Image (cartoon, coloured by chain):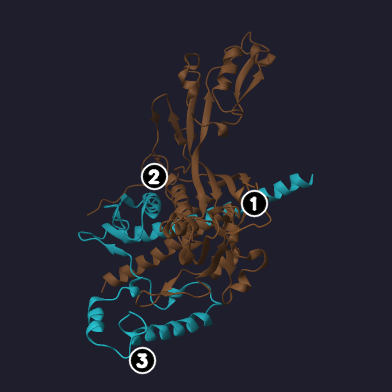
Chain colours: A brown, B cyan
Amino acid sequence: MAPSSGRRLASRTKEEPEERKIVGINKETVTNTVSTDYPDNFIDEDHAWDVDYFRSKFRVEWHENNEHEAQFSLIGLDASIANAFRRILIAEIPTLAIEKVFMNNNTSVIQDEVLAHRLGLIPFTGGKKGIRDWMTYLSKDADGQDLCFDHNTVQLSLSVECTKNKDAKPDETDPTKLYHNAHVYARDIVFQPLGDQEKWFSGDDIIRPVNPDILIAKLRPPQVLDMDLHMHKGIGADHAKFSPVCTASYRLLPTITITKPILGDDAKKFQECFMPGTIKLEKVTRQEARQAGSGYEGHEGENKAVVANAMYDTVSREVLRHDEFQGKVKLGRKRDHFIFSIESSGQWDSDELFLESVKVMKQKVGKLRQLAVTMVTENSI
Amino acid sequence: MPGRTINEATRLEAKTEDVAMADAPTSAQSHAEESHDTAETMREDGEENGSKQGEEEEDEEEQPPAQRIRVLPGSTTTAASYEFLEEGHTLGNALRYIIMKNPDVEFCAYAIPHPSEPKMNVRIQTYDTTTAIDALKKGLQDLEDLCDVVAEEFWTKRNEFAASKADMMSE
């Protein structure tokens, strides 16, 4: 029989001491890397899961929010949770991408399969509501045959013929002037609306490449490209072309603690050990210089190194290589402060993507919770 | 395309017996009737799908979702291993964390026994104040709650950030 736990004192705190949240970074080693905020690990600390406590502690700070790049901090999370969101961002948010290429004619020098692969990797965008809510995954019938409908397939076509430009100067050498359609770009792909697609994807919401200037192929007269393309919904776990992000990553917030004053030329050198903006120089004030035991005595007016913004630090540990800073500085990272950086590939906005990842996580967990319930009833026959 | 490969038997048949043009199959596919059938079911499905386009997603509503969790042999009420199909580190580690946060749980860990099998195992051992399955269900529920809190805070702060940016622009 399992032992029962003798626990739960009413007076126990849920707070984890700040210093325990710091991962120590030494010249060659790291310390305190594992999270320990679990019940029964510390006698007078609770650490049991509590939504309300989590809500009171969890914070988001924004640093940058553009269409194609967002940077923000999630504070008060465990790495396992932050990592789940990151993994979902990369591999489990559905997007549209070219999945089938029907080659009617290809007389270019690029082989069919290479061309098809190139086409698959071009990111497309369009009416977001249509893509997210109306479009569904491709369904198959009992025999495994694809069932293509307007709500699961987007048809595109690419039909280009390279011809001579009769108006070109006789001594012209630039192929783009010498010929028509010498270069085939993503913008040459034409959306062919089917069924109800007109309703969701017209005007500004038309299905189009995110970047119209992606070069697909180079042609010479009389080479021809003629193909129909089918786009389907898919996820990054299946193929990277479906991944909605270029990169989605996080890093822990660096901490720099100056334990003993760093003054004068040393301060300048100290500053140069970090990325610009991390360390600033300030003058030692008269008050500080007067204070006995502060380490500033007799240094009034000299430069001292002060941490301006530790977030800019790359944690290169350069500062630990110099003997003059030995024992004067402590580097670390905050274990529950995740600086996320999400670069969208263009189908979604970067901030929407993170919200989407939380939604995917919630759906996934919700489905499994129901399965866990049905599993119990199945087994208790 | 499999349809283009003529199977050996039909090829030989065609050689030995001359077929009248009208009787010859239009394609190399052996059963013309079957393909007609699929065409019909396709149309039916199309109508079905067409009629419920207004509804939100959930095509699978008709049949219950396939069971993806299984109790592994040797499990007792307070010490059990669960096998999740089609799940990986994404859920495994998050679930492990949140279950470990439960004070009634003595031990929790997850493993992916082999990288080329789509399986993820979770081991839960509890004190006698609860059962392993309850700890699992609580863990999943807690994760759901966590997602709500994260999403809410994230979007509130995002809107505040957008507003502060707009203020800066107008000043």
Q: Quadrant of residue B23?
A: bottom left
Q: Position of residue A222 (x, y in %)?
A: 54, 60
Q: Position of residue A256 (x, y in %)?
A: 53, 27
Mark 2 vs mark 3: same chain?
A: no
Question: Do the numbered discs 1 and 3 sit on residues whose CB atoms are within 8 Å?
Answer: no
Relative placement, left or right, of A356 versus B83 is: right
Category of crowding for the residue at label 1, using alpha-carbon neighbours closer than 10 angstroms: few (below 14), some (14–19), many (at least 20)? some
Q: Quadrant of residue B134?
A: bottom left
Q: Which residue is mark 2?
A: A38
Q: In the structure shown, which secondary structural element does the residue marked by tag 2 occupy?
A: loop
The residue positioned 44% from the left and 60% from the top of the image is A112
Query: Could you tell me how far apart the alpha carbons at marks 1 and 3 are, in whole angstroms?
Result: 54 Å
Relative placement, left or right, of A77 versus B130 is: right
Can you tell which of label 2 and label 3 is closer to the viewer? 3
Q: Which residue is mark 1?
A: A177
The residue positioned 44% from the left and 43% from the top of the image is A12
Farthest residue to the top: give it: A298
Q: Say above or below: A262 vs B171.
A: above
Q: In the structure shown, which secondary structural element does the residue marked by tag 3 occupy?
A: loop
Asked if one can make out residue A18 in the rendered structure from this viewpoint, the answer is yes
Question: Do the numbered discs 2 and 1 sit on residues whose CB atoms are within 8 Å?
Answer: no
Category of crowding for the residue at label 2, using alpha-carbon neighbours closer than 10 angstroms: few (below 14), some (14–19), many (at least 20)? some
The residue positioned 68% from the left and 15% from the top of the image is A287
Query: Could you tell me how far apart the alpha carbons at marks 2 and 3 are, in whole angstroms?
Result: 78 Å
Type of residue at label 2?
Tyr
Q: Quick one: A105 or A278, which is closer to the camera?
A: A105
Q: Quadrant of residue B27?
A: bottom left
Q: Chain of mark 3?
A: B
Q: Which residue is mark 3?
A: B22
Mark 2 vs mark 1: same chain?
A: yes
Q: Quick one: B60 or B125, which is closer to the camera?
A: B60
Q: Quick one: A182 or B161, which is closer to the camera?
A: A182
